[in-house]
């Protein structure tokens, strides 16, 4: 008894074991699909719950995506105003303009000289009369710089502003991005909210699948006992349940995709007329094929996770007696 | 094949199921395990199949000390033990074929091999041609034989039977026991737990008698007659 013989784990040769490993997996995957098919009502109920739960985060994703395209078109509205030192000659200003135009970060430059600035001020401010009492024009010349798309974001524009302020002729520069930053803060808040809601719904999906699998395990209690008695390993017993969870996820994901497309189709008409009033021709985007793939992948992972957690907890508890 | 050395088992409630049980069942032997209900028969079988573990003493099955077997290796040990139950533990929603094939499927045999072995096992228990039936369509004796076919289909070196004839009339019981004898002739070690003393009396095999958790008498010498008198029948 001192030298203990090794337990024989398998009576099959290694090649046969590898082949059978894959065959078993396919059989279990197909078997659990068949199991769902045989109980269509309860399976469909679960899948519908999953589809609806998953469609909400996916819908929010669509919303964020569309909001991003809209805000991106607003981003380019950022403009930098450069105020020129008093007493610079017209020639040096012209050379500054040509230098700035050569910047790769800049897409357009426009120049307002001191006379034009005064004229504009008189017209817009209503202090025209008062200005007449001044001996000389107090306004500086202004160069308006529109950054290229790459530098249109608040950070990029600020970077560009710093660079422009290094030019000797520039007294100081101003970047009108407050409203842009506010908009971006709102968008960020929306994104956070979406993430939080999505996380909660994802949790709900895991719990729903976990509970469904728990019921399935309870229903097959005697079968599991018998399998344990005749030498089935834990992984063998849990595999069909894990595949069931994955199938739930896959079909729930597809359902969510269908729901999203219906939703987009339903909203598109209303949105088009709204945007039409603003003279925009933006079209509402749905999920792309890649995103559909990601959705199904995520859903099947959630299905696997939910059933894995359930199986871990409940399969152990069933022991033959 | 089965070696118990001063094995004791106390259940969590404090109930003493087995006390200081020692015996050795050699490879190729056939023996009966008997005693009143509650004498510890089921506990002894549970210790062999590692459904329960002993509190004291050593249990060795097929050369493996149970104490050294980790929980995740228990399934591999159980594959060497064919188990037959009084209530046969068949899966009612699966055909006879699928029921018998279960141990082979678990071990990962290929389908053609499974077919061959299942039909051979069915033939052995005299149910050839009923593989497409469901257990519910069979009589009690036939169901028991399906259970036996499942136990022997992967040719385990050890066969355990817990009251295999519990619900059967004497003639059917005898048929079942003859079946066990043929497996024993083929080299399988067989241990049958039963309280059917009439059955034991008709066959001359070694008998282990349990009374209140202890093995009675000089177990090596125990014969059918001493067993009967020990029960006072």
Image: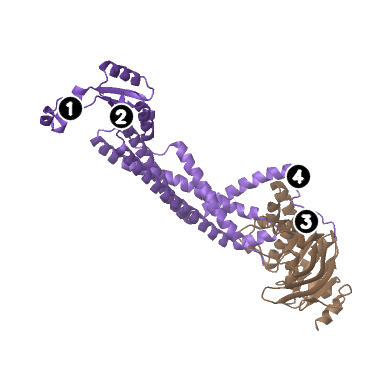
> How far apart are the alpha carbons under marks 4 and 3?
18 Å
Q: Residue at x 80, y 74 (%)?
A: B20
Which of these two is toward me, A172 or B178? A172
Indicate the chain on which mark 1 is placed.
A
Disc 4 target residue: A13
**Labels 4 and 3 within one chain:** no
> How far apart are the alpha carbons under marks 1 and 4?
91 Å
Disc 2 target residue: A172
**Labels 1 and 2 within one chain:** yes
The answer to whether B231 is drawn above or below residue A110 in the figure is: below
**Labels 1 and 3 within one chain:** no
Disc on res. A268? none
Query: Which color has been applied to chain A in this rendered view?
Result: purple
Q: Which of marks 1 and 3 is in front?
A: 1
The N terminus of chain A sits in image quarter: bottom right
Disc 3 target residue: B155
Q: Do the residues labelled 1 and 2 touch (CB within 8 Å)?
A: no
Disc 1 target residue: A120
Indicate the chain on which mark 2 is placed.
A
Point out the residue furthest to the left here.
A129
Q: Where is residue A224 in the image (x, y as percent from the top left)?
A: 63, 60
Q: Nearer the viewer, mark 1 or mark 4?
A: 1
**Residue A48 in sight:** no
Residue density around tag 4, few if under 14, some if 14–19, many if 20 or more, within 10 Å: few
């Amino acid at each position: 008894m001192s030298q203990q013989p090794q337990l024989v784990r398998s009576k099959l040769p290694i090649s046969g074991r590898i082949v059978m490993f894959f065959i078993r997996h396919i059989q279990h995957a197909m078997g659990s699909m068949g199991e769902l098919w045989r109980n269509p009502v309860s399976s469909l109920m679960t899948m519908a719950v999953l589809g609806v739960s998953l469609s909400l985060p996916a819908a929010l994703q669509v919303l964020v995506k569309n909001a991003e395209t809209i805000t991106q078109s607003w981003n380019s509205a950022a403009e930098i105003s450069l105020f020129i030192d008093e007493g610079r000659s017209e020639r040096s200003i012209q050379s500054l303009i040509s230098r700035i135009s050569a910047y790769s970060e800049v897409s357009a430059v426009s120049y307002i000289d001191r006379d034009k600035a005064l004229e504009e001020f008189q017209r817009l401010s209503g202090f025209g009369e008062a200005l007449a009492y001044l001996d000389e024009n107090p306004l500086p010349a202004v160069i308006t710089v529109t950054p290229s798309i790459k530098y249109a974001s608040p950070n990029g524009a600020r970077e560009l502003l710093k660079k422009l302020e290094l030019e000797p002729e520039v007294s100081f520069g101003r970047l009108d991005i407050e409203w842009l930053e506010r908009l971006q803060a709102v968008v960020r808040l929306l994104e956070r909210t979406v993430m939080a809601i999505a996380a909660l719904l994802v949790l709900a999906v895991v719990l729903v699948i976990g509970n469904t699998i728990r019921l399935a395990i309870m229903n097959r209690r005697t079968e599991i006992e018998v399998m344990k008695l005749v030498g089935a390993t834990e992984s063998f017993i849990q595999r069909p349940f894990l595949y069931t969870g994955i199938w739930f996820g896959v079909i729930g994901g597809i359902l969510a995709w269908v729901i999203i497309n219906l939703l987009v189709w339903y909203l598109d008409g209303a949105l088009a007329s709204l945007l039409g009033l603003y003279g925009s021709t933006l079209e509402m985007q749905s999920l792309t094929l890649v995103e559909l793939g990601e959705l199904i992948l995520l859903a099947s992972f959630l299905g696997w996770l939910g059933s894995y957690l359930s199986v871990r907890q409940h399969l152990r508890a069933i022991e033959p007696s | 094949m089965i070696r118990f050395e001063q094995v004791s088992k106390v259940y969590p409630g404090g109930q003493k199921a087995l006390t200081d049980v020692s015996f050795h069942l050699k490879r190729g032997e056939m023996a009966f395990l008997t005693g009143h209900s509650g004498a510890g028969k089921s506990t002894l079988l549970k210790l062999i199949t590692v459904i329960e573990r002993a509190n004291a003493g050593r249990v060795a099955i097929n050369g493996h000390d149970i104490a050294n077997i980790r929980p995740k290796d228990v399934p591999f040990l159980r594959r060497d033990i064919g188990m037959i139950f009084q209530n046969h533990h068949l899966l009612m929603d699966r055909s006879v074929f699928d029921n018998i094939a279960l141990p082979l499927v678990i071990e990962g045999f290929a389908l053609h091999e499974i077919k061959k072995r299942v039909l051979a096992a069915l033939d052995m228990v005299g149910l050839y041609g009923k593989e497409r039936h469901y257990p519910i369509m069979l009589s009690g004796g036939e169901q028991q034989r399906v259970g036996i076919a499942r136990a022997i289909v992967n040719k385990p070196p050890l066969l355990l039977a817990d009251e295999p004839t519990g619900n059967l009339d004497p003639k059917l019981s005898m048929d079942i026991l003859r079946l066990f004898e043929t497996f024993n002739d083929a080299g399988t070690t067989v241990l049958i737990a039963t309280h059917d003393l009439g059955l034991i009396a008709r066959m001359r095999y070694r008998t282990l008698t349990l009374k209140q958790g202890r093995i009675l008498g000089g177990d090596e010498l125990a014969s059918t007659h001493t067993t009967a008198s020990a029960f006072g029948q």
